[in-house]
Each structure stands twice: as C-alpha cells, then as structure tokens.
Image (spheres, grey):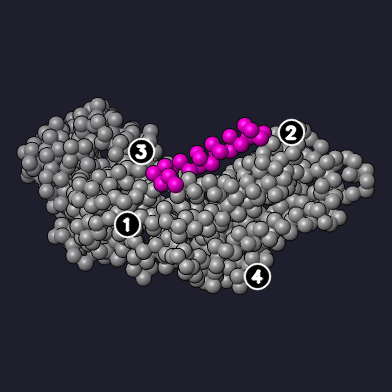
Amino acid sequence: MRKMLALALAAALVVAGTAFAADDVIKVGIFNCLTGQNAFGGQLELEGTQLAHSLMPEILGKKVELVVVDNKSDKVEAANAVTRLIENDKVNVIIGTYGSSLAMAGGEVAEQAGIPVIGTSCTNPLVTLGKKYYFRACFIDPFQGAGAATYAFKNLGLKKAATLIDVANDYSVGLGTFFRNAYKKMGGEIVAELKYQSGDQDFTAQLTELISKKPDIVFLPAYFAEGAIVLKQAKELGAEFRFIGADAMDNPEIVTLGGDAVEGFMHTTFAYDPSMKEMNPVAAKFTEEWKKVHPDKDPNVNSALGYDCYVMVADAITRAGSAEPAKIRDALEATKDLPTVTGVTTINATHDAEKEMGIVEIRNGKKTFLGLVKPEV
Amino acid sequence: MTLNIFIQHIVNALSLGSLYGLVAVGYTMVYGILRLINFAHGDIFMLGAYFVYFATIVYKLPWVLGVVLAVVGTTVCGLLVDRIAYRPLREAPRISALISAIGVSFFIENFAVVVFTGMPRPVLQPPVLMQPIQMPGGVRLIPLGILVPVVAFLLVGGLLWMLYRTKPGLAMRAISHDIETTRLMGVPVNKIIALAFGLGSALAAAAGILWALRYPRVEPFMGLFPGIKAFIAAVFGGIGSVPGAMLGGLILGFVEILSVAFFPSLSGYKDAFAFLLLIFILLFRPTGLLGERLEDKI
C-alpha cells in the first residue's frame, strides 16, 4: 500500500514536472516587496500586473502564468527571490521591483543567468547602468529635468531660466544638468546657476542673486521640505519669476509648510493620475478595469507601472514570436512607441523608458494636472 | 551688482548673522563660566522652536503668549539638562562633561524624532511681521527682517548689562575665574551656574523662535547646522567672550551671504569660504578675535 502510494506520488510528480516544462506556458516571474517597509508600493504594483494578466491571459496563443515571489523589502531576499524564480520556477522573464536598491540586488542575479527583467518604479540610473538584461517601465530621475525644460520653453514660452541646485544631492545635480542641457539645446538662455547644500535653511543670498538676474523661471529640483522654505523666502523677497520642480516636491505637506507661497508652483510627475481629465485609451481602460476589481481603492502611478510592465512583456514576446529569454531581451530593447498607461513608451540606449510626463501646478492649495509634456533630450 | 541688490544682501546678512550671534552667545556664556562646550545648545534651540509650534499652531494660543510659554518651557528643559547631565560631573574631568553634552544632544534629537516625528512642521508667521515694505531704490524689507537683528542685539545687550552690572553677573564672572575660591566667598555656586544655564537656554529659545520665524519650518534636526555654525562663530570671536560671539556670528553671516553675492557660480562652496576664513583668523589669532586666555582649551 505504502509502495503504491509512493509510486503514485512519483508518477504525479513526473506528470506535473513535464506539464510545467511544457512549451505552451509562458512563465512571468514577479519579484516585488509584498511585506516589509516598501510593501505599500510593491503590493500596488503587483495588483497592476495581475490586472493586466487577467485581461491578457494568453500571449502568442500560449497561457501565461504569473509566479509571484516576495522580496520582503530586503536586499538579500531580493537576490534570493530572483534566484528562486530563475532556478526553481524557470521563468522566461521577470517583472520587478519597487525600490532601486532591491532592483540592483536582484538585477545582478538575473544578469548572470541571462533572464530579462523589467523594473517597475526603480528610478535610480544605476539600476540599468551597464546591464544587458535590465530594463524599466519608468523614466529615470534626471529625465524629468528635460521634461521641466521642455514645458517651460515650449509650452509656457519662457526664454530665460535659472537653476537652484542642491550640490550635496545627486538627484538634484542630475536633474539640474539635464534641465540646462535641454533648455539650451532648444534655444533658451540660462541666466544663472545658483547652488546650496542639503541642510541649508537660509536661501536669501541665492534668491537675491536670482532676482538680480531676472529669469522668467527657476528650476528647483529640491525635496519638498527645503523647497517649501525656498518658495517662502522667494515670496518674502518679492521674487517675480515662477518656479518649477520635480517629483521630490510631490508631497501634500508642501502646502502645509509653504502656505500661499507655493501657489503657482509647478512640478513634473509621472503621466498618470486617476483624476486626469484626458486619458490615453490604455489609461482609460486601465482605470475602468481597476475600478471593477478594486472598487474600494483608487489606482495610482505604481499600479499603472505594474500594469505597463506586463504590457511591455506581452509586446516584446509578440514581436519576438518566441518566449525564449534571449529573444525577449532583444525585443524589449527594440520597444518603440508602445502605448502604455503612463504614456507612449520607447526604450532608450540605457534601457530606460522615455515617455511623456505630467506637469502639475499647485492651485488653491491643491494639485492640478496641467497636461503632458514629451521631454526633448 | 547694483546698489539696491547689494543693500538687499546686507539686510539678509544682518538677519542671518545676528541669529548665528545669538546662538553663539549661549555657547560662549556656558563655556566662559564652566569651560564646558554645551553641544546640546543647538537642540535646546530646536526645542524652543517646537514649543512655539505647539503653542501657536497646535493649541492655537495667541502668538505673544506662545512665545512666552516657549521661553519658559525651554528654560525648564535647559535647567533639567544641567541638573541631570552636567551637575553630577562638576568635579569630574572636563572631558567627561563634554561627552555627556554630546550624549544629551543625541538624546534630545532622537527623543524629538520619536515624539514629534521627523516630518517638518510649519510655523506661524504673524502677518503684521510679513507685510513687505518697499524702500527707496527697490530694496524690499519685511518687518521681521528688522525685528530679528534688533531683538538679537537687545538680548545680547541685556545679557552684558546683567554680567557687568548685577550681583549674579559678578558671581558668574567670579566663577569663571575660580570656582573654588568663589564658593569659599559664600556664593551659592550651583545656583549661579543653574542661573547661567537657565539664561543660556532662554537665549537659545529666543534664537530658536526667531530662527523659526525667519525660516518657518521646525524639525528635530533643525538645531544641528545652526548649532555647529554658531559654535564656530563663538570660537571665531574668542570663546568665552560675549561680544566676541556676537561679532563672530555677524562675520560668519556676512561671509556666507556675500560670498554667494560676489561669486554666484561658487555658491555651493559658501561654507568652505566661511571655514577658510576661520582657519586664517585662528592661525593669526589662536584665541579668536576678542578672546583673551590661552589656557584651558578643549
């Protein structure tokens, strides 16, 4: 009896084993932070990917299976999670993760195994730097600098700009350089480049200097806590130029801290917000389907990026005509003008997504979506 | 640079420099009496700013009342710090008290993170202080910009008067010369030292409140940079000397602002300019601008 059972089990295992190895299933691995400190973002991204999967359960006529592994918001776990997906589950392609440091830890493993990965919201340039197999659905931090420049020059028609940069912060320095390069390339004039250091609280000297140079707009890629104080001091000094910042200013606290001084302040952000008036068809469909599955919570940009990763995978596999990891990789690299929730996506030479970004203005203490801009790099 | 822009820079520098000076005076006073560098001074300053935030924004008290309560609250905290962390070490080697001061500083900062959270908070700026005044030549002033240096100078003037024209002031100066002999003369040394700490904390509170008015945001680590800068200003002016601390603060403020004004492309290095100047001054005058003694430095 016992022998029989063992035999039956063994047989079942063999059958199961062959079933999993069958060619008619495409396995998409997901490694994201479902527990731990980043669980909030990781969970939303997973739900976005799952939504896309439920709408497109088959690619090339083959069934797609999602294999989800939790990286627990931990760098060591992230590497383990990717190893498991590749060695145990033999996935064709991987999606993940929220958090650039987790992406870097996992990316190393995938790189060696030769399995392509699409990052959801890991925006640090280092994630894909020098990597053959890592891509991402989001744009990188500095790209927003070009977006702000394009909006200021093309949409607002402002010809003279200045920058106020935190020299002790890579994010700020990177954005500032991209802003100046893009702005000059379009024909704009940079009238001043002022600097400060993280932790500074007095910006009156820099602001007085900016006032004397009479720019039309000042690019301020600061964090919200400093940015709010800069805006306050600018108002006290009677500055007449406008300010534009980037996503680090995207925090409701900026209004609490800055009060009426932040009125009219603009910043760049990802090109998706459920409150957007004009959505592209993919975004409209995403929002509609999301509300059916999750009637009690709004989608956000993370769920949109999770969705977009799946769309990119489906597109790459379809174009490759195969689910072989190396072919998916080549197809991903050639992604061009793909409609996604967060805009029309093109993968550039450094494997980052180039797409439109949103411009938001603070009006009456509230974020107002002004429109989209396609950065000219 | 046009004249009005230059004057605007001077106004800004006066404001920043007098704030540095006011914090520096607190450092120098405690040092002058106890030979103790009170590293917790910047954190006491932070507490003052938080008390005003709680009084005026959270409990919606009238602004003036909030300020009074904040000064009282901060003074109590300063006295507690002296009683708990410094007084038991009065006879211990000087380095022990110094380490204790660093410990107190870390404790207050992290305690504030736990209790107040790390999220920066806004500060109420009375509208009457913010109404811009357009001066001839395009210079723009707000009443706050005048109030800050005026209050700072008045407070320092008051402190000097106290030190040189009153009995407790005389006792403080005596303690700074020789603590044992002063005790033998029948001066209640611990009470006088507590008074010095109370005064130092009240000054820190005043500076914290003015600082928060000028740069309207409170957070647990807001005392860190002003504290370091003010300490430098105190050394600059000659540590132990009250007028020296004020002078050091003003010079530091002017160097920071004017270096940005004259070399805008090097504005990321404004601290480097200030510290370079400090090194030069100390090379030629090791005891600082107005310092006297050479012994007993930590």
Q: Earlier in the sequence, mark 2 or mark 4?
A: 4
Callout 1: SS: loop
Residue A215: mark: 1
Please name the residue shown 46% across and 41% down the image.
B269
Q: Quadrant of residue B279?
A: top right
Which of the two marks, 4 or 1, is nearer to us in this view?
1
Reply yes or no: does residue B276 show up in magenta: yes
**In the rendering, at what x and y percent does residue B149 appear?**
60, 59
The boundaries of the magenta stretch are B262-286
Chain letter for the residue marked with disc 1 in the picture: A
Which of the two marks, 2 or 4, is nearer to us in this view?
2
Q: Do the residues at pointers 3 and 1 share their chain?
A: yes
Q: Are marks 2 and 3 in contact (CB under 8 Å)?
A: no
Q: Is residue B62 left or right of residue A257?
A: right
**In the rendering, at what x and y percent does residue B54 appear?**
59, 64
Residue A101: mark: 3
Q: Are marks 2 and 1 in contact (CB under 8 Å)?
A: no
The residue lying toward the viewer, choosing from A280 and A35, is A280
Residue A330 visible in the picture: yes
| Separation of residues labelled 4 and 1 (CA atoms) | 42 Å
Q: Which residue is mark 4?
A: B65
Dot 1, crowdedness within 10 Å: few (<14), some or many (≥20)?
Answer: many
Callout 2: SS: loop
Q: Which residue is mark 2?
A: B294
Please name the residue shown 74% across and 56% down the image.
B159
Q: Quadrant of residue A296?
A: bottom left
